[in-house]
Amino acid sequence: MTMRDDVENRFPGGAEGLGLAGLMVLQGGCAAFFLGDVVTDFSDIGHQVLFEWHLVLELLASITLVLAIALEGRMLMRLIRRQAHFRRGLSVASGALHDLIEAYFDSWALTAAERDVATFAIKGLSNAEIAQMRGSAEGTVKAHLNAIYRKAGVQGRGALLSMLVEDLMQEPLIAPQT
Amino acid sequence: MRKVKVWDPIIRLFHWSVVLTFVANAWAIDDESKLHQQVGWLIVALLGLRVLWGLVGTQHARFSDFPPSIPAAMRQVQDIATGRLHHHIGHSPLGAWMIYALLLGLAGLCATGVMMTTDRFWGIGWVEEIHEALMVVTAVAACVHVAAVVIESRRTGVNLPRAMITGTKVMPHDDAR
């Protein structure tokens, strides 16, 4: 089945994802190094450390690096999620559709697993197929779907789909070229 | 529930011995003391045992059971991003990378540590600086390792710390394979 090939025979994240992950590891190493220096100096000279400008700089640098790593982690998760759900994620149309779906998921506060299940359900996969793709039991998929319907305030799969279709018919999928 | 024997006694002995000796040498024992060197040699012996066991040991102890693989690691990141659960019996792909990073960090610490005791490198600045930098990076990596074990235990529902004590992973019901 092609959907399965989609997800399993590809390198998740691709070169872009790998670059991001590599950057995170590198920055983690730098942050560790700066933090280590601050800790060593702190144990050497105590609270006076706060008046040493280069230590304050190091502390700021490591905090900034940790924040950057967290942001990159979020970007990586979004990137990989998009690629896991849309093979041709670079095309304008699927990008717009994905943004629309993601906006709905955000407003319903779906978990990562629920987003995954909801996307597959929208794509028309059966519960058994979704369970197989996710490596989980069918009962778990049903539980996820019930949570999705409850959060979205719809009765079932059909209502979920028609909600999206309604939005798509109101707005053009491809943004007008300016 | 499915119980799987994963970590043999040698793996567990190695793991907890390294925890003990590394923490002791990094914080408790005076760097200049003879004891610091003796504990260091103990770590050299433990690493030797682990490498040997990685070649001839039990199934999940072997390096061939957890090769460093970027695609496999990214698939695990995808599982995390999409909330999917594919259970790994031995080391997970991201875990494998951490094992190699920690082993290399320890090996580097041992190498620079031994160098400092030789006439040729005694008192040479850069050897000592590398030794100290490696200590910090390895310690931070160990902290990330512990955090990741807690996060992955919660995500997958498999109690990983308990598996490293008892040697047995208890896999949850929700397991298609």
Image (cartoon, rainbow, N blue to C red):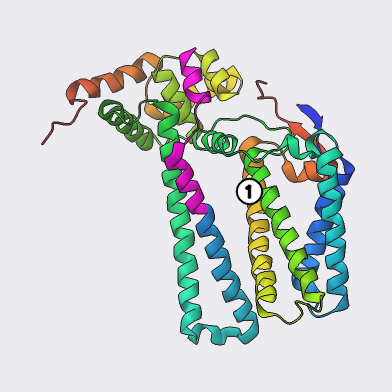
Q: Considering the numbered disc 1 on the image, is that residue within a helix, a strand or a loop? A: helix
Name, please, the residue furthest toward the front. B120
Residue B175 appears left or right of A69: right
Res A133 → quadrant: top right
Query: In this orientation, which residue lies closer to the viewer: A111 or A37?
Result: A37
Q: Which residues are magenta?
A: A1-24
Instruction: Chain letter for mark 1, please.
Output: B
The residue depicted at 51 percent of the width and 79 percent of the height is A55
For the residue pair A130 and B113, the one nearer the viewer reads as B113
Q: Tell me: residue A54, above or below residue B20.
A: below
Q: Is A26 on the left-hand or right-hand side of B155?
A: left
Q: Quadrant of residue A102?
A: top left
How many numbered markers are drawn? 1
Kindly identify the amino acid type of the residue bearing the numbered disc 1: Ala
x, y percent for residue A7: 49, 24
Name which residue lies at 81% across and 79% down.
B119
From the top left corner, tell me how far across and down residue B56 is, in percent: 86, 38
User: x%, y% of residue A124?
Assistant: 41, 14
Q: Quadrant of the C terminus of chain A?
A: top left
Residue A13 on the magenta span: yes
Inspect the magenta stretch and tell me whether residue A6 lies in it. yes
Q: Which residue in the structure is indicated by mark 1? A: B148
Chief secondary structure of the magenta span? helix
Residue at (52%, 19%) from the top-left corner?
A130
Vertical relation: A163 (above or below) A32:
above
Q: Nearer the viewer, residue A71 or B104?
A: B104
Q: Is residue A85 above or below residue B58?
A: above
Taking the spot 73% from the left edge, 32% from the top edge, the residue there is B89
